[in-house]
Amino acid sequence: MSALAAVRTAVRNFLASIEVPGEVCVAVSGGADSVALAAATAYVARSRGFRTRALVIDHGLQDGSADVAAEAAAVVQKLGVEVAEVRAVDVASEGGPEAAARTARYRALREALSDSEGLVLLGHTLDDQAETVLLGLGRGSGPRSLAGMRSYDPPWGRPLLGVTRAQTQGACVELGVQPWQDPHNADPRFTRVRLRGEVLPLLEDVLAGGVAPALARTAAQLRDDTEALDTLAARVHERAERAGELETTVLAAEPAALRRRVLRRWLLDSGVRELTDAHLRSVDALVARWRGQGGVWLPGNLEARRCHGRLSLAGPQPEPTTRGE
């Protein structure tokens, strides 16, 4: 099978597995992955009858970025995409350049959707999935991170998670287009670039090849396990929840893997942000290792407390006022 055929097959199979809206958007950077994805989506649309729209995000982080975005829009329209629009975004300085650009990009893509049932296809490949798993492993982020990216996480769709970067590049050659080469993708200041250019090639050499597909398979297996545990945890949460609080007797009877998933969901739903594993384990100790200890302070100036057999979450108590004589 040719590289272009492989990309088209991946897109066709993905869209056959979901309910496709009347319009399918494709996030386009101008690189090989997104250009090949946009071309394949337009190709499939001709037989499926849905509209296609390319969303080109101009991050404004490099000189000439507006010209690059305009060229990317023109290229995908020549390849059959019906509408291509450029959206400029402001990238904040907090959180590092990669994270800030990603946050701005996803916000712009979501805002571009015409309705809540919209779909945006992203050009993440098998290689990107392998890099994501390695990053999660190196950072000790746990099984949720090692499970990698989901192929369908509305409104996001990732049809190319089984397609390699070499195949998207080959597809562009077959299409007769020269994709944009982002200089950031060769900048060793970025962690992903060093993973891509140094770590993965070394692993491929030491382990005699096949590392990227193996990491992607590991992600798929962990994702199945994680989703199964999340389903079970949702049932425990339903039994434990009482008006926004959690019954500790219900939680204490469950294995740690389920108990912590319930606590994680409860804390996130209650407004806790930047939740770490250390935070989660400290709150879990209020259930599994209860010795009458005090509450656990969490990001957002919130405190998880145990009282009368229930966990609750509250902000700081107001300072007592004194009356003047």
Image (cartoon, grey):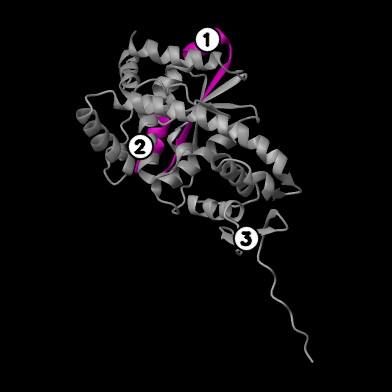
Q: Specify the segment rendered in magenta.
A: 43-71
Q: Nearer the viewer, residue 18 or 263?
A: 263
- Give the residue number, with chain letter if any, for mark 2: 134
203 relative to 245 in the view: left or right: left
Mark 2 or mark 1: which comes first in sequence?
Answer: 1
Mark 3 or mark 1: which comes first in sequence?
Answer: 1
Amino acid type for the residue under numbered disc 1: Arg
Amino acid type for the residue under numbered disc 2: Leu
- Give the residue number, with chain letter if any, for mark 3: 303
Tell me the CA gap for discs 2 and 3. 33 Å
243 relative to 68 in the view: left or right: right
Residue 105 position in % (x across, y down): 48, 39
Quarter of the image with the N terminus is top left
- Give the residue number, with chain letter if any, for mark 1: 46
Residue 221 position in % (x across, y down): 45, 26
Mark 2 or mark 3: which comes first in sequence?
Answer: 2
Is any part of residue 35 visible from this angle?
A: yes
Quarter of the image with the C terminus is bottom right
Tell me the CA gap for discs 3 and 1. 55 Å
**Residue found at x 33% / y 39%:** 192
